[in-house]
Amino acid sequence: GQQLNQSPQSMFIQEGEDVSMNCTSSSIFNTWLWYKQDPGEGPVLLIALYKAGELTSNGRLTAQFGITRKDSFLNISASIPSDVGIYFCAGQLKETSGSRLTFGEGTQLTVNP
Amino acid sequence: SAVISQKPSRDICQRGTSLTIQCQVDSQVTMMFWYRQQPGQSLTLIATANQGSEATYESGFVIDKFPISRPNLTFSTLTVSNMSPEDSSIYLCSCRQEIYNEQFFGPGTRLTVL
């Protein structure tokens, strides 16, 4: 089956630093989604990517859909304490997976003030 | 986007009992899903809730253990049957419109089985 490798598994950074995390897949995807999950909450959609090579920003967040369609990265600039949480990537290949999302294992981000 | 609510938000249950989790979406959606997230883990799809027909279950999940209803385009329930401590987890409802590829999640139901 499809697998997503998300890295790093965890990050400990100082407030103000930039952060980068990425996901790679053994299969191609048509859609990449990035979510953030706070403790005790459901995942919240941050950015959706639909085209190979697409670069999309949402405030301090920037994500790119890899040109090979097998990878994506998420960057957070000038981190702040409320960026703490778990970030998940998710990919979808609609034609063959019945529209199911495949999730990465998550990146736990800790921001020290 | 779609706003999803779940009830209950958390529960503590005894072994052998069953719990039904409700999911309500604020708009009609084509697809609804149920996920499980065990502590410190990623999300695992349990099933796709199909409106007016039986749910489609993923490998490792069966209807007798996780019966699902979806009577209309805005509502679904997941029942966790004959619970054991291994069922302790967060259960998440999710939805997607067919024309978009954005998928949204509810706040989750945190289940503890003693």
Image (cartoon, grey):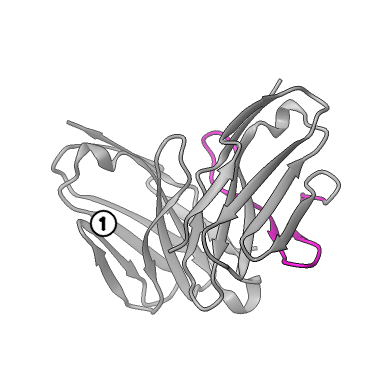
Of B69 and B55, the residue lying toward us: B69
* Residue beneath the point at 78% across and 46% down: B66
- Up the image or down, A72 lies above or below B20; here it is below
Q: Position of residue A110 (x, y in %)?
A: 30, 35
Quadrant location, the N terminus of chain A? bottom right
Instruction: Please say whether residue B6 is one of the residues in the magenta stretch.
Output: no
* Residue beneath the point at 72% across and 26% down: B85
Quadrant location, the C terminus of chain A? top left
Residue A80: quadrant of the picture: top left
Q: Residues within 10 Å of mark 1 (few under 14, many from 20)?
A: some
Q: Position of residue A111 (x, y in %)?
A: 24, 36
Instruction: Please say whether residue B47 is one of the residues in the magenta stretch.
Output: yes
Query: Would residue A44 be found to the left or right of residue A113 on screen?
Result: right
User: In the image, which residues are magenta?
Assistant: B37-62
Of A74 and A45, the residue lying toward us: A45
Query: Would residue B6 be found to the left or right of residue B51 on screen?
Result: left
Q: Position of residue B60 (x, y in %)?
A: 77, 50
Residue at mark 1: A75
Residue A65: quadrant of the picture: bottom left
Query: Would residue B57 be found to the left or right of residue B39 on screen?
Result: right
Q: Main secondary structure of the magenta part?
A: loop
Q: Is residue B59 visible?
A: no
* Residue beneath the point at 82% across and 50% down: B62
- The amino acid sitting under disc 1 is Asn
